[in-house]
Amino acid sequence: MATAEEEKFYIELCKKPIRFEPISKANNIFFDDANKQVFAVRSGGAMGVTVKGPDEKTSISFRMEDRGDVISVKFSPDKRILAIQRSSKSVEFINFKSDMTPDAVEYSQTCKGKSTEMIGFIWTAVNEVAFITNHGLEQYQVFPEKHSLKSQKMISLQINWFVWLSESYILLLSSGTLGNALHPFQFRQNFLNRLPKFEVDLPVIPKPPKLSLLERDVIIANIYGYLYIVVLRHQPNATVGAEIVLYQLQKDSPAKKTDILQLDMSGRFAINIVDNLVMVHHQASKTSLIFDVKMSGDMEAVVKIHHSVLPPLPINPFKLLLPSLNMTAGTEKAEYNCELYSGNWIVFQPDVVIDAKLGCLWYIKLNLEPLVTMLSDKCKLIHFLLCRRDSKKVILSVCKQMLIPGQQVKLPIVSQAYDMLNQVYKAYRDAESQVSAGEISPSVMQNTWKRKVIIDQSDMYTNVFSVFEDCKDIRYKFMVAVLIEYIRSLNHFSIPVQHYLYELIINILVHNNCFYQLHQFLQYHVLSDSKPLACLMLSLESVYAPAHQLALDMLKRLQTANEEIIEVLLSKQQLLPALRFLFRFIRSVGIVDSVSARKFLETAMNTEDKMLFYAVFKFFEERNFRLKGNPRFHPGEHCDQYVKHFESLYGTEALALVPVHS
């Protein structure tokens, strides 16, 4: 449960950061964004290397020979080969054993060409590495057992800088004097796919031309399953706020400009992608903004213009336990407030913030609960929450609040909210049907829906409509109207309505003596026919006499009356009118031949009405004769006690005397 102070912030740092030795003259810090590992390299590795990852299992320590200052260090995807760049010409490799101890032998690979200088390197597969140089791309296969590499492919291109998204294996290379000519590549299972290049619009072209689009202003992002090149564009006029432009990558055509995010601020920014949101941190104001490309926006031609979902707000303050300076106080550690938006912060994709001076790595988190009070537009809020993972509890809370006096919203808003919920619910049901029909595999279904939130009827009944019982101040007319709107929405999306929703409406109407409205709902099929509903109506005969006839009409329309219905009727042990009604009912739907005689005879005997028992007994004797040519009951029907009871009342001579044939 969030505290009152925490409810002011919707962005926070993870509670338990990854701690590492802070940067110093003897200790350098590196981050491998592919494996999410922090490397603390002391004295070039001679004094030790400590690697800390997302969990304790990926944390290791080792030593390596000091061969100069380390520029970059990264493990292969399987953590069995370590690559170290110490110069602009080559990369060294060290094999690691299964116990994560390093091999004594190092081997290296030099980039091609005397004038070639390496900008960086990336692991593109378990045993594949790519060098990005100022002259192009060099792809190598690593043979760890042979301590060697083999060139696989080379692409010549004058390169300024590169950006890499490891989770999608997308590499973006910048070329040209201005740096705005971008070349996307995708690595797939020993195959390098070169996507069409494109140019990024620049707000102004300098004279003379110089590098204008910088690496720090570009990231690659996976947003709602689509790959985007995200470009931070500073305006030449400081009074005009900066903006972020999204270019969606295409397979067979240049990347398409789809969205522009208006920041309305200038200065230094950093970008994270959190739960499909573009999160922008502004250092000068020490605030952050969130943008959702699924939200509506203004259109300029084919480009959608977005404003932040909420006004700028800071990250939730974070406290850290550090060694105390006052050792006489009797405590070894003291609590310190971390400086947010520090100049020491470095942001990595998609959701990592590192403070190397403090020795902390955090994951950025989105706290959804404060948004409930921050977003007054409930439809906008629910639309936003439906796109967030782990938002089910918050959505149900919002839906419940919409019905409580003092927070109630108008019925059209309730209706729109329910349509949004059921649209997703319907899509999920359709996907389930596709799996059942073999049209898609269960794994595809799971991958598609694992992050999505489904609000079904049981969720609404248990967590939302329960407020009708908890809060006695809600007018019953509003309750009924809300339930009818939810049922309308279910019907609109062709989702079968569960009977407990109908029961809830009926119980509310009966409790408030609104029998005429109930009659109208049933007569005009606002409440759909069903066996459970018919049984409920039968139980209401004592308070509303026409309920019996309404139930009978419903069962006739269904044409699926069975022993379950009869069981309910007989369990009431009604007197003669009820049994006569029952006879009329079973004759009307043509199931008299299959009805159990024992149940009827038991009910008739329990009434202690001799004439009624006689009529029932003779009714089934006639049925037996018509079906089997013999009026007697078969032993399997277990009617012996009722035959004896009949004999005790009327004598054996009153029994039909047709012999039983063996």
Image: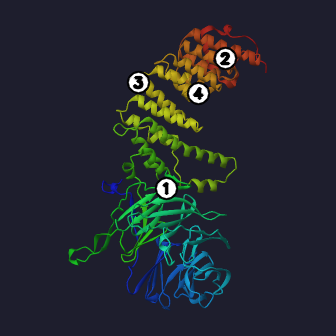
Q: Which residue is mark 2?
A: 587
Left or right for 661, reference 230: right
From the image, state whether disc 2 or disc 1 is nearer to you: 1
Q: Which residue is mark 1?
A: 305
Q: Mark 3 and mark 1: span between their CA atoms?
A: 51 Å
N-terminal-most mark, 2 or 1: 1
For label 1, the crowd category at 10 Å Cα-Cα, with few meaning under 14, some 14 to 19 and many 20 or more, is: some
Q: Mark 4 and mark 2: span between their CA atoms?
A: 20 Å
Check disc 2 and give the amino acid type. Answer: Arg
Q: Mark 3 and mark 2: span between their CA atoms?
A: 36 Å
Q: Which residue is mark 3?
A: 512
Q: Dot 4: what SS? A: loop
Q: Residue at x 67, y 16 (%)?
A: 620
For label 3, the crowd category at 10 Å Cα-Cα, with few meaning under 14, some 14 to 19 and many 20 or more, is: few
Q: Dot 2: what SS? A: helix
Check disc 1 and give the amino acid type. Answer: Ile
x and y, in percent, of residue 119 in the image? 54, 82
Which quadrant would residue 441 be assigned to in this image? bottom right
N-terminal-most mark, 3 or 1: 1
Q: Mark 2 and mark 1: span between their CA atoms?
A: 68 Å
Check disc 4 and give the amino acid type. Answer: Asp
Q: Quadrant of the C terminus?
A: top right
Marks 4,1: beta carbons within 8 A: no
Q: Dot 3: what SS? A: loop
Marks 4,3: beta carbons within 8 A: no
Q: Mark 4 and mark 3: span between their CA atoms?
A: 23 Å
